[in-house]
Image: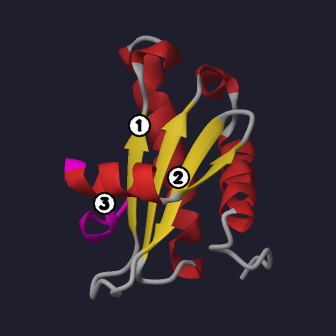
Amino acid sequence: MLPARNRMTRSTEFGATVNQGVRAVQPDIVVHARRCAEAAPDGPKVGLVVAKSVGGSVQRHRVARRLRHAARTVLDDLDPSDRIVIRARPSSRYAISARLEQQLRAALTKANLLDGIRR
């Protein structure tokens, strides 16, 4: 589970990240990443978008849990001013957690938020 201080909850934050951030596409997820000018005192923020196209509510919640777990593993590698929105694609319902984490790291590296070195 993501700590409450690292959850993106406001639609304005989602909108700013999606509209002004860098988009990195992977087979199962799309990551919108943005580095803000000011650093947040409580660290990076992560938001999830899991649409009905992913599946029924059980499948959507399963995908969301896996994405939250993957996001939690990269929090320590991010800058406190980073904002990330992870959008699940329909194929994500078949992906295992390790694959989602690998794709998240690849997308963040492509967006220049990670240096590609696992810490």
**Which element is circle 2 on?**
strand
Q: Is residue 43 magenta?
A: no
Q: Earlier in the sequence, mark 1 or mark 3?
A: 3
Measured in 3D between alpha carbons, the distance from the residue under mark 2 to the one under mark 3, in whole angstroms, is 15 Å
Q: Is residue 21 left or right of residue 38?
A: right
- Label 2 sits on what residue type? His
Work out whether 27 lies above or below 75. Answer: above
Report x, y in % for residue 52: 41, 16
Question: Marks 1 and 3: CB-CB under 8 Å?
Answer: no
The residue at which mark 3 appears reads as 7
**Which element is circle 3 on?**
loop
Closer to viewer: mark 1 or mark 2: 2
Work out whether 71 lies above or below 56. Answer: below
Q: Is residue 44 left or right of residue 103?
A: left
Q: Residue at x 54, y 33 (%)?
A: 88
Residue 37 is drawn in which quadrant?
bottom left
* Span colored in magenta: 1-11
The residue at which mark 1 appears reads as 49
Measured in 3D between alpha carbons, the distance from the residue under mark 1 to the one under mark 3, in whole angstroms, is 12 Å
Q: Residue at x 49, y 14 (%)?
A: 53
- Label 3 sits on what residue type? Arg
Closer to viewer: mark 2 or mark 3: 2
Work out whether 79 lies above or below 9. Answer: below
Residue 56 is drawn in which quadrant?
top left
Report x, y in % for residue 75: 51, 72
Residue 32's disc is 2
Closer to viewer: mark 1 or mark 3: 1
Q: Decide if residue 1 is in sight here.
A: no
Placement of the N terminus among the 4 image quadrants: bottom left
- Label 1 sits on what residue type? Val
Q: Name the residue nearer the viewer: 44 or 33.
A: 33
Q: Earlier in the sequence, mark 1 or mark 2?
A: 2
